[in-house]
Amino acid sequence: MRHSTKTITAMTLALSLAIPLAACGGQTTQNGDSVPVASEQTNATTASIDVSAWKTFGDALAAKSEDGTSTAAWDEHHYVTVFQAGDATVRVVVKMTPEVYAKIADLDASKDDYEKKFAEVVGGLELESAEDITGDQIPQDQLDAHVGKTGQDLLDAGFTFQSYYMNGGEETGATMQKGYFAYNVTFETTVDEDKTEDEGEAIKGATITAMECAGGADSAVDISAL
């Protein structure tokens, strides 16, 4: 039975460490459209990267951008991550071993050499798959087209609620996901702290004031879906 799955979303990479996500496409985290919704398209002019030669996790990490976004999750069987490689975004599935899993748990993420140690520990792991998912990212102009619409409009367009990242003020921030990517959405409404476990119910009727890409979605690194 699988257990102790770990998930991380990072703004500036620590190869796997956690903070809020950042930048991708237009600018910043776990997915827009023009009018009508059905006409929404992903970016046709995206960057690309050749991942065909990658055999190990070390090969993949060698292409990783130091200041790019990173989302990851792992258990005793797999390590799944979405990260930036230059102007491209890739999704990598790695075969985990019990020995490496234990070594990762022993690493001290607070140390300055954590990234180096992490790469040394996982570098030899075999890749199960690697794919360039840049084309799945929604362009900023299509995200901007959602401004003035509501949270329910996003749900109707195929987005799902991931989490709140800002609440208690005149505006509320929620991370929505679609496909492999997450998007930070600002709503013109107030959601109190005691309402943040409502799975996004409070923003369904709220007006969108801004929207931007936030990196890989939690669903993109969902190990249970492998």
Image (cartoon, rainbow, N blue to C red):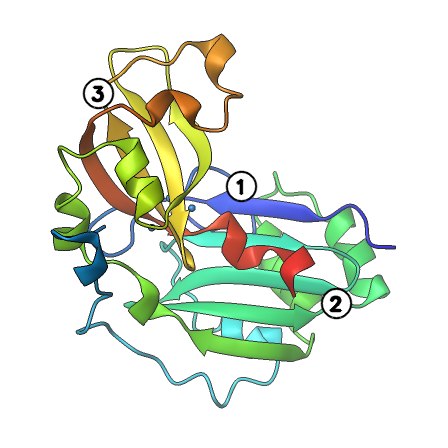
Give the quarter of the image for residue 174.
Answer: top left
Does residue 209 sit above or below 113 in this rendering? Answer: above
Does residue 26 sit above or below 192 in this rendering? Answer: below
Number of disc labels: 3
* Residue nearest the observer in this picture, 113 or 192: 192
> Quick check: can you spot residue 158?
yes
Mark 2, residue position = 96
> What residue is at 46 percent from the left and 32 percent from the top?
163
Q: Secondary structure at mark 1?
A: loop
Mark 1, residue position = 18
**Circles 3 and 1: CB atoms closer than 8 Å:** no
Mark 3, residue position = 188
Q: Nearer the viewer, mark 3 or mark 1?
A: 3
Question: Residue 40: horizontal and vertical position, in percent?
Answer: 20, 59
* Residue nearest the observer in this picture, 115 or 224: 224
Q: Is residue 40 left or right of residue 225?
A: left
The dot on residue 26 is none
Sort mark 1 into few (<14), some (14-19) or many (20+) by Cα contacts within 10 Å: some
Does residue 110 sit above or below 222 in this rendering? Answer: above
> What residue is at 36 percent from the left and 55 percent from the top?
68
**Circles 2 and 3: CB atoms closer than 8 Å:** no
Sort mark 2 into few (<14), some (14-19) or many (20+) by Cα contacts within 10 Å: many
For the residue marked with disc 3, what is the amino acid?
A: Glu
Gap in angstroms between the C-alphas marked 2 and 3: 43 Å
> What residue is at 42 percent from the left and 46 percent from the top?
30
First in sequence: mark 1 or mark 2?
1
Question: Residue 132: horizontal and vertical position, in percent?
Answer: 40, 75
Q: Secondary structure at mark 2?
A: loop
